[in-house]
Image: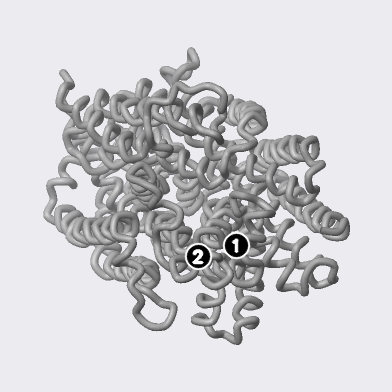
Amino acid sequence: MDEQDGPESGFTVAAPRAAEEEPHAYTAADIYLEVQRSAAFQEVRARYRRFVVPATAAFLAWYLAYVLAATLAPAAMARPVAGPVNVAMLAGLAQFLTTFLLTWAYTRHARRNRDRAALDLRWTVLDRGVGRDRGGQA
Amino acid sequence: MSGGHQTLALALFSAFVAVTLAITTWVSRGRHGSPEEFYAGGRLFSPMENGFAIAGDYMSAASFLGISGVIALFGYDGMLYSVGFLVAWLVVLFLVAELVRNCGRFTLADVVAARMRERPVRIASGTASVTVSVLYLVAQMVGAGSLVTLLFGESGTAARAWGVIGVGALMVVYVTLGGMRATTWIQIVKAVLLMGGAVALTVLVLLRFHGRLDDLLTTAAAHSGHGKAFLGPGLAYSGGWTARFDFISLGIALVLGTAGLPHILSRFYTVPTARAARRSVVWSIGLIGGFYLMTIVLGFGAAALVGSGAVRASNSAGNTAVPLLALDLGGGAGTTGGTVLFAVVAAVAFATILAVVAGVTLASSASVAHDLYASLGRRGAKAGGRKRGEVPVARVAAAGIGAVAIALSLLAQDLNVAFLVGLAFAVSASANLPVLLYSLFWRSFTTRGAVWSVYGGLVPAVALVVFSPVVSGSPGAVFAGRDFHLFPLENPGLVSIPLGFLAGWLGTVLSREKADPAKHAETEVRSLTGAGAA
């Protein structure tokens, strides 16, 4: 856990005015806007979305197709495949399987393509004196 | 059923209560009452610990008893619940867990309020969170009541009320004394017990069929009274178009509701980083997926070994299928093995209910103190959520929510547990998910959009339930004698979830003020990098 910082580390409890004591005259808003426009951040965001958007669309469509098939076409789903096993049973187990596979693919993708760059950006923001601002309570 | 299992089940359950109370006092010794400590348990749990705790929070008695019961009665259709409950975790993993950990501090409203005018957003979002939590609590406590009835038989009406009150009182004790740290450890203990119980029963079922799953399915179909139809969809939900749409509605609510459940979201704040939040979700998906696979075996096992008819005779909703299966696997009624297994299952189910209600109560007390009180209170309007008095308020709120949940559960005792959980999911998906996703991903989202999105999902969801056949106009309704139902479906999700998204879009488009690009930049940068995370 290289990017750990516990609640004791002081980022969140420091005075809200900390940013103004920095030598730069940046405000937090300027820095976030600047980082948001930076190529490094755009790349992290693009990598995240390139995985998440199609994957979400795919699993939602696959799940919806499964629910609709089970409710609207039960006869087709009940068609036997081997012994007592039918199409519906295989489809249900396939939902479990695809969920496990997508979980694995997502974490692998995040670890390989996103984590390092995101951590670097986090330090970029911190170096500019933001991050010890108002935490989540704005 | 003999009195032996009652005594043993009570003894086992008392042991669980004693252990968890000891944990509560042990982990909260010498802890100061900061909000960080009370709501987030100090934020230093490991991903594995949090993964177990999430699984413990999620695997309610409704799934342990309810899903396997539905499978025992209706066969394949019960599996649809398992699938929905599991696939929902992909929404959490992909779109919510890491970003919420990075942007918020204690509650869902934190994430939204960071971009918006704080007061209206917190009031709206806090109200929605408390509504969802109370519905979820009622479901669990009604389940506790059914379990008491099962244990004490017909004469258990008074015992049932006392069971509900006892569970409610215990959860208030855990939450007010131990906060998130104690609640988390209770979830972990409970998750281990529940997984252990499920594994043991599954192994026993598989041993009975010599590991041949096809034999299990064939026998289940033969003893169900439905033959081959038992193994395909349609027994429970293909009655007519209303039943079909009701199931589609439930399916959508299940898959989208999880990501808006306040007690699930608050679990991500107990780990130090977004990466740790992601790894907790991976742990919980593994645990939950394994658990639901086992409930399928248990459900078909109950149909095969106990028989659907016998299950239905014991409880028309099927909630007693797993305890009856345990009795049979142990050697049947009257044997020592049967008595022990039955008592163990009953005690595990009790422990499950107790742990889940503690988690939900904690999350809703955070919403009351951190969002509602801090915004509605006179001083709170200015000072945000960091006042001294917040934790004491949360403790009082936990006691208050406990009292409300006990009262409502006593009124709703005859409603089906799995159905009540489905309602909580529908409200969560309608009121919480749209505002959360819009805040995280939509550049132009405004305060008005946020407020409209919450109320635009919450009000239709609740109203459609009030005017549904659940409340009036059907034999099993709350007010069975009256009929003021206007909406045909039992689950409102199919209508109210799109309305939540629509209202958020409409409110944003009709806003006079434009979204602040700097605030959006802040949310986007923080959510993806973890800069400034609490």
Give the vertical position of A93 relative to B73 (above or below): below
Q: Earlier in the sequence, mark 1 or mark 2?
A: 2
Circle 1: residue type: Ser
Picture quadrant where residue B12 is located: bottom right
The answer to whether one can see residue B411 in this image is: yes
Q: Chain of mark 1?
A: B
Count of numbered marks? 2
| Residue B494 vs residue B300, the one in the foreground | B300
Contact, mark 1 vs mark 2 (Cβ under 8 Å): yes
| Residue A19 vs residue B340, the one in the foreground | B340
Q: Which residue is mark 1?
A: B308
Is disc 1 in the same subunit as disc 2? yes
SS for callout 2: loop
SS for callout 1: helix
Residue neighbourhood size for the residue with mark 2, other residues' Cα within 10 Å, grouped as few (<14), some (14–19), many (≥20): some
Residue plotted at (48% across, 35% down): B132
| Residue A41 vs residue B328, the one in the foreground | B328
What whole-number distance in Å separates the C-alpha atoms at marks 1 and 2? Answer: 9 Å
Q: Which residue is mark 2?
A: B226
Residue plotted at (62% across, 53% down): B319
Q: Residue B17 at x, y = what percent?
A: 77, 50
In the rendered structure, the answer to whether residue B414 lies left or right of residue A84 reads: right
In the rendered structure, the answer to whether residue A62 lies left or right of residue B51 reads: left
Q: Residue B111 at x, y = what percent?
A: 35, 38
The answer to whether one can see residue B532 in this image is: no
Q: Residue B387 at x, y = what percent?
A: 52, 25
